[in-house]
């Protein structure tokens, strides 16, 4: 049974999140996307927790929940994200973590324990005055079935390896609780090949989730995990992750990391974006305002890596680069992803082929060309084959997606060279 899972999302009670992020909307759009397992997100928030208790029905013998629908059923895993703020080596650290738990009863016990460390109702992703190892110890002591995974580990702020207030190694963050960490979330601005450059991460399973603040398909499931299990249960999914079993954990769906908002180093206010090499030549300073540049994930990985690009560890879980279908259509047409014309084409494709992941992963090009104009079909196939060009995102700005003309042969250059558009000379 193929399970496509997005295990890290948010509710309408998180800051900067759509008010449409309710369970019914999430379930509706997840079916359109092709997701069949989602994290609930935000179980620490009292209003969201009450909503989960009101609308979700526990599925017998699965430690998962649903809305009670039997057709195209979407399962929910009880999850949340929290931020721990603490001092280590005379520096304040702010680290985000994703927590998974088998049921709402255990979630309430976790909330009872964390309530003394922060105001849970202030945000769907609460800030807790406790260290990362204290969080792990607290959550694991409630039940060994609970799981903690560091979230979006490379983003500059609020992450394990973040350049602003993170760590240079995992054991400094989790200390004597490191043994309980078995997986890491790559985040939008990194992918498995970037993480494979650090030998210290080889034993950890890499997972990918959207961290979505919107229910729409161009956000929900933009990164996900693909499992093949005989039966979808909490235990089977967690075991597939913790055991790094490629028989059951088939691959992750990754956004091209250059498309993420923090892939390259830059300064949004001055419209400056530079590669790691260029950043080094600038000594990390903006050539316009002379303030420090926001260090991108690509540069941060270079700092900590002990391997050259291209290394792949044995027994690594595979990955697949994709771009949301609406963003593909929008890039081809030169339209916003949420525009009416894009939605009309998108909905037409969904009505014919069932869901977005089927279109992106499975439907042959000749079938696509019968339903949409050839240049959109060609763009979908280019994304599927990872033959696209992305101008890297930086300092909170998403990357820009472009496609090769229909009459141009697909490039075999590696992605880093594809997106390397040197602009340093005009600033010096």
Image (cartoon, rainbow, N blue to C red):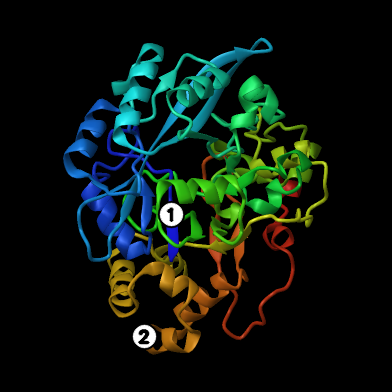
Task: Please tell me how many numbered marks the rendered image carries.
Answer: 2
Residue under label 2: 371
Q: Quadrant of the N terminus?
A: bottom left
Give the CA distance from mark 2 to mark 1.
28 Å
Seen at 27% across and 54% down, the residue is: 27
Q: Quadrant of the C terminus?
A: top right
The part of the image, by quadrant, that contains residue 247 is: bottom right
- Which residue extends farthest left? 54
Residue 108 lies, with reference to residue 327, above or below; the image says: above
Seen at 77% across and 36% down, the residue is: 303
Q: Is residue 73 left or right of residue 178?
A: left
- Label 2: state its secondary structure: helix
* Label 1 neighbour load within 10 Å: few <14, some 14-19, many 20+: many
Residue under label 1: 5
At which x and y percent is residue 414? 73, 64
Q: Sequence-wise, which precedes: disc 2 or disc 1?
A: 1
Residue 236 lies, with reference to residue 301, above or below; the image says: below
The part of the image, by quadrant, that contains residue 300 is: top right
In terms of depth relative to the viewer, which is nearer, 78 or 41?
A: 78
In terms of depth relative to the viewer, which is nearer, 372 or 421?
A: 372
- Which residue extends farthest front? 61
Residue 407 lies, with reference to residue 380, above or below; the image says: below
Seen at 60% across and 75% down, the residue is: 404
Nearest-to-viewer mark from 2 and 1: 1
At which x and y percent is residue 49? 25, 32
In terms of depth relative to the viewer, which is nearer, 396 or 49?
A: 49
Looking at the image, do the residues carrying marks 2 and 1 touch, with CB atoms under 8 Å apart? no
* Residue 215 visible here: yes
At which x and y percent is residue 252? 55, 57
Which dot marks residue 381?
none
């Amino acid at each position: 049974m193929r399970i496509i899972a997005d295990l890290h999302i948010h509710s309408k009670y998180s800051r900067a999140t759509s008010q449409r992020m309710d369970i019914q909307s999430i379930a509706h759009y997840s079916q359109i996307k092709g997701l069949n397992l989602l994290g609930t997100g935000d179980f620490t928030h009292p209003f969201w927790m009450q909503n989960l208790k009101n609308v979700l029905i526990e599925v017998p013998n699965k430690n998962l929940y649903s809305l009670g629908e039997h057709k195209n059923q979407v399962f929910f895993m009880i999850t949340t994200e929290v931020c721990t703020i603490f001092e280590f080596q005379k520096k304040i650290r702010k680290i985000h973590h994703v927590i998974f738990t088998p049921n709402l009863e255990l979630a309430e016990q976790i909330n009872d324990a964390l309530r003394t460390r922060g105001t849970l109702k202030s945000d769907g992703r609460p800030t807790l005055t406790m260290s990362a190892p204290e969080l792990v110890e607290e959550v694991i002591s409630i039940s060994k079935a609970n799981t903690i995974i560091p979230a979006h580990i490379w983003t500059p702020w609020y992450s394990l390896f973040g350049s602003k207030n993170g760590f240079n190694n995992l054991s400094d963050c989790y200390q004597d609780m490191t043994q309980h960490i078995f997986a890491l979330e790559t985040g939008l601005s990194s992918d498995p090949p970037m993480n494979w450059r650090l030998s210290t991460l080889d034993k950890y399973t890499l997972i990918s989730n959207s961290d979505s603040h919107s229910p729409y398909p161009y956000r929900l499931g933009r990164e996900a995990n693909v499992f093949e299990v005989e039966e979808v249960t909490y235990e089977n999914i967690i075991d597939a992750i913790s055991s790094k079993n490629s028989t059951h954990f088939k691959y992750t769906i990754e956004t091209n990391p250059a498309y993420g908002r923090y892939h390259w180093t830059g300064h949004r206010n001055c419209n400056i974006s530079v590669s790691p090499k260029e950043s080094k030549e600038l000594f990390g300073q903006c050539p316009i305002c002379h303030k420090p540049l926001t260090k991108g994930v690509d540069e941060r990985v270079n700092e900590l890596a002990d391997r050259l690009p291209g290394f792949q560890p044995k027994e690594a879980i595979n990955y697949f680069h994709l771009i949301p279908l609406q963003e593909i259509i929008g890039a081809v047409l030169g339209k916003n992803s949420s525009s009416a014309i894009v939605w009309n084409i998108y909905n037409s494709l969904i009505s014919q082929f069932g869901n977005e992941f089927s279109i992106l992963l499975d439907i042959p090009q000749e079938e696509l060309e019968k339903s949409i104009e050839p240049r959109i079909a060609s763009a979908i196939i280019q994304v599927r084959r990872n033959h696209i060009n992305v101008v890297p995102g930086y300092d909170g700005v998403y990357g820009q997606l472009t496609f090769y003309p229909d009459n141009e042969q697909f490039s075999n250059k590696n992605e880093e060279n594809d997106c390397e558009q040197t602009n340093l000379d005009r600033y010096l």
